[in-house]
Amino acid sequence: MRLYVNIDHVATVRQARGTDEPDPVRAAVLAELGGADGITVHLREDRRHIQDRDVRLLMETARTVVNLELAAASDVLALAEEWRPHQATLVPERREEVTTEGGLTFTGEGVREGLTEAVRRLKDAGIRTSLFIDPDAESVRASLELGADAIELHTGEYANARGAERHEQLGRLRRAAALGRSLGLAVHAGHGLTYENVTPLAAVEEIEELNIGHSIVSRAMFTGIERAVRDMAEIIRRARR
């Protein structure tokens, strides 16, 4: 299993003061030293945290790979075609949300057509393409129909659940992961994962990549980001064993 570290929240702290620190690109270097297999950034339409400059520098300096999250209907799509990251993950995006609140929807006027066009453009640029979806069979099959290479299962409901409900949400994720793998899709997962809840999900054989950001950045305030990434990577390795 691969661990991709999302550095958006390093940029959130920087933008709170409108200064040049902390630098998310420096955080990416340290995350890689701590064992990250890739770096994830979400370049939002409103540029609330990650900036164009950050992605450009990451493309030049990352020793691993860059996973660029973006909305299908934004100016970032053209930038992705120019920058050509290893992977692009299409995500839903709303101005009023604090963070991504759920997976992509595939209904509504022009929605499916817009996603199809975005996937086509990314693949024509040679970019591996993933769709961030809720863990249900309809979304998995829709992702295949749109031509995606991979799916990223939204783990927010699992992360927020407790007791029997968490077990139920874990079952949803397992079933969606199994279906995705059976259809030939690569299966990723992320959102709300922490050092406390990641182990059961990391043990799901069909999931090959986890995207984790906020929990790692939070721990890094006390331990440093290299140690925080190393700790998370070790938990994931133990789960796979």
Image (spheres, rainbow, N blue to C red):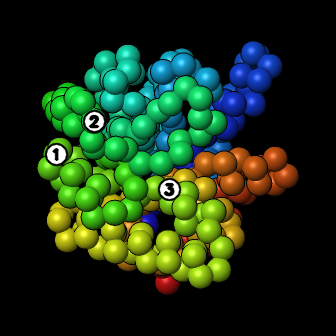
Which residue is labeled 2 in the image? 108
Label 3: how many Cα within 10 Å (few below 14, some 14–19, many 20+): many
Q: Amino acid at mark 2?
A: Gly
Which residue is labeled 3 in the image? 190
Instruction: Say whether disc 1 or disc 2 marks the residue closer to the N-terminus.
Output: 2
Q: In this rendering, would 64 be left or right of 151? A: right
Q: Residue at x 60, y 56 (%)?
A: 192
Q: Residue at x 22, y 29 (%)?
A: 110
Q: Amino acid at mark 1?
A: Gly
Residue at disc 1, secondary structure = loop
21 to 228, vertically: above or below: above
Residue at disc 2, secondary structure = loop
Q: Can residue 57 be seen at all in this image of the molecule?
A: no
49 to 112, vertically: above or below: above
From the viewer's side, name the closer residue of 55 and 46. 46
Q: Which one is in front in this view, the residue at disc 3 or the one at disc 2?
A: 2
Instruction: Say whether disc 3 or disc 2 marks the residue closer to the N-terminus.
Output: 2
Residue 155 lies, in percent from the top left, at 51, 60
From the viewer's side, name the closer residue of 93 and 203. 93
The answer to whether mark 3 and mark 1 are in CB contact below 8 A is no
190 to 237, vertically: above or below: above
Q: Which one is in front in this view, the residue at disc 1 or the one at disc 2?
A: 2
Q: In this rendering, would 131 be left or right of 181? A: right
Instruction: Say whether disc 3 or disc 1 marks the residue closer to the N-terminus.
Output: 1
